[in-house]
Amino acid sequence: MMEVQMISLRSVFLLFAVLTGTTAQVWAAKGGDVVKDVNLDQYAGTWYEIARLPNKHQKGLVEVTSTLKRTKDGYVMINSGFKGSRGGKKTTVKGNVMVKNKRDAGAMKVRAFIFSIDYRIIDLDKTNYSYALVTTDSEKFLWILSKSPVMEQQVYDRLVESARQKGFDVARLERVSQESNSALVGR
């Protein structure tokens, strides 16, 4: 039986930081920018975490997903993962998504409880919305996301190169197991 792990407010903030988008000042200084004209209805759905920069808040988490859902009041983001394996403790965090400027929907804020963090889409397959490169307001956080739990090596390599060109330490990227999710979708 799976047990849902309750986490502290600090952990909620940090988990969202981990599961989402670089400091605006640092990012601007590096010449980076968020993807413009993101269609949130196309972006909505479940994203599988394929790789991330390591961080203490996600240490040992596998089968990590981030789901953007439309509600009558806008959008919510639900992030979840399992400690060690699909049978491990599950961590789930839900937050409201705020977009100041629909033209710049690649720059969102996600609010959970009293915390609000940046969610910055810095690379995106704008044709099929099948992959994304996301960071927060800290260049220490980076995620490679896919709408499928399996990502083609060519696409992964392209996103790693994109992150490297944006100044991220891609040598530290760690792959995230999606073994059970891959089996569930028949891949």
Image: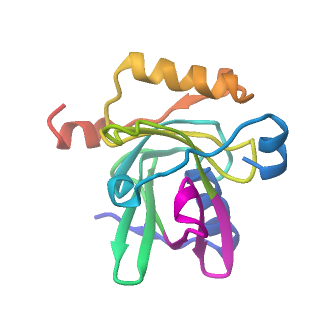
Residue 160 % position (x, y): 56, 23
The image quadrant of residue 44 is bottom left
Residue 81 % position (x, y): 44, 54
Asked if residue 146 is positioned above or below residue 105 in the image, the reply reads above
Which residue appears at 62% of the width and 46% of the height?
A: 34
Relative to the observer, which residue lies in front, 146 or 127? 127
Report the quarter where the C terminus lies: top left
Q: Residue furthest left?
A: 186
Q: How many callouts does the rendering have?
A: 0
Which residue appears at 56% of the width and 44% of the height?
A: 35
Would you say the magenta stretch is mainly helix, strand or loop?
A: strand
Which residue appears at 71% of the width and 37% of the height?
A: 32
Relative to the observer, which residue lies in front, 6 or 54? 54
Relative to the observer, which residue lies in front, 58 or 33? 33
Which residue appears at 18% of the width and 43% of the height?
A: 184
Q: Indicate how the structure is coloured in the image.
A: rainbow
Report the quarter where the N terminus lies: bottom left
Q: Is residue 12 left or right of residue 42?
A: right
Q: Is residue 100 magenta?
A: yes
Q: Is residue 15 magenta?
A: no
Residue 43 % position (x, y): 38, 53
Relative to the observer, which residue lies in front, 95 or 163? 163
Asked if residue 34 is positioned above or below residue 155 in the image, the reply reads below
Asked if residue 84 is positioned above or below residue 118 in the image, the reply reads above
Residue 123 % position (x, y): 53, 37
Asked if residue 136 is positioned above or below residue 158 in the image, the reply reads below
Bounds of the magenta segment: 94-118
